[in-house]
Amino acid sequence: MTSPTLRLALALLLIASLATAAAQGGAGIALGWTAQVDALVLDVPADAADVTQVTARAENGADVALLTLRHRPDGRARLQGTLPDLRGSHLLQPIASAELWPCAMQASGDALFAPFALWAVGAPAVMDLASGPLPEAPQPGYRQLLLLFADGDVRVQGACLEAPTALQVDLYLRPGWNLVASELAAVGERDRVLLRASGPSDLEGVAWRWRDVSAQKPVEAVPMRE
């Protein structure tokens, strides 16, 4: 059984469709044990002008940081804030845990990790870092970059070709915050999701985008936990 966050990432690519230690560019993020975010967010609706906070949320619903969303007259907004050092956090799980993946994965070490998503506080929306707006019909090449935290260097590999969603995994995670590329690829007559380490080219042509998720419950800010 996959975690809700990873399962959501795969579903987005099918049905509607880690990086260097200091990756920057269109992503507007610098990675390390902490991550600094300073980036424009596209597609923010006019009626979201009162949304001024975005929370970094784990798949179990725990908030680990609040970022500021500053609205601009041109209809865009700037997302700014710091993602914390999560070493020792109860949110981290063994990276090859059978509960996280649809089939067995091979890991090079015993590192712990956790995926996170950025939710608007008080509105049904998430901030996607993607190559374009989420398409109604997925096309090979559509790419999202997902935020993960790892407490050490680790590589994880596997291929879940018999799963309902064909999944190929080849990740190398550095200590701290990472960006993971989730990309739809056509392999023969069947689409496959590639979950792989991202590189500088993956940061080209991507942007943070407001995506409405009205079918899901809006996120409210909750007290941070150590």
Image (spheres, rainbow, N blue to C red):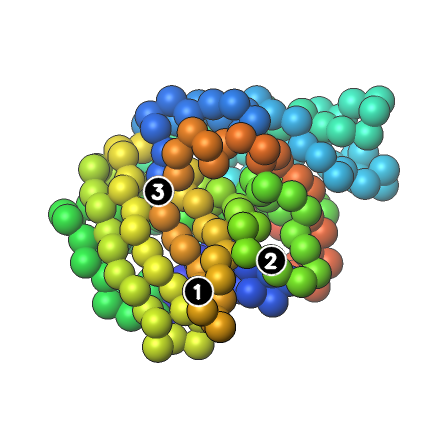
Tell me whether circle 1 and circle 3 mark residues in contact (CB < 8 Å). Answer: no
**Spot occupied by residue 13 in the image (x, y as percentages of width and height):** 55, 59
Q: What residue appears at the point 60 percent right and 25 percent down from the top-left corner?
A: 39
Residue under pointer 3: 197
Residue under pointer 1: 187
Q: Taking the image as drawn, is residue 218 in sight?
A: no
Q: Earlier in the sequence, mark 2 or mark 3?
A: 2
Task: For mark 2, give the secondary structure.
Answer: loop
Tell me if residue 85 comes above or below residue 135 in the rendering. Answer: above
Q: Quadrant of the N terminus?
A: bottom left
Q: Earlier in the sequence, mark 1 or mark 3?
A: 1
Q: What residue appears at the point 38 percent right and 75 percent down from the top-left corner?
A: 163
What amino acid is labelled 1 in the image?
Val
Q: Quadrant of the C terminus?
A: top left
What amino acid is labelled 2 in the image?
Gln
Residue under pointer 2: 139
Q: Taking the image as drawn, is residue 174 in sight?
A: yes
Q: Nearer the viewer, residue 65 or 72?
A: 72
Give the quadrant of residue 98.
Answer: bottom left
Task: For mark 1, give the secondary structure.
Answer: strand
Q: Badge 3: few (under 14), some or many (20 or more) residues near its Cα, within 10 Å?
A: many
In this rendering, the label closer to the viewer, 1 or 2: 1
Q: Nearer the viewer, residue 152 or 28?
A: 28
Tell me if residue 179 comes above or below residue 93 in the rendering. Answer: above
Marking on residue 113: none
What amino acid is labelled 3 in the image?
Ala
State the CA–CA distance, disc 1 to disc 3: 19 Å
In this rendering, the label closer to the viewer, 2 or 3: 2
The answer to whether 86 appears left or right of 107 in the picture is: right
Which residue lies most toward the front here?
Answer: 188
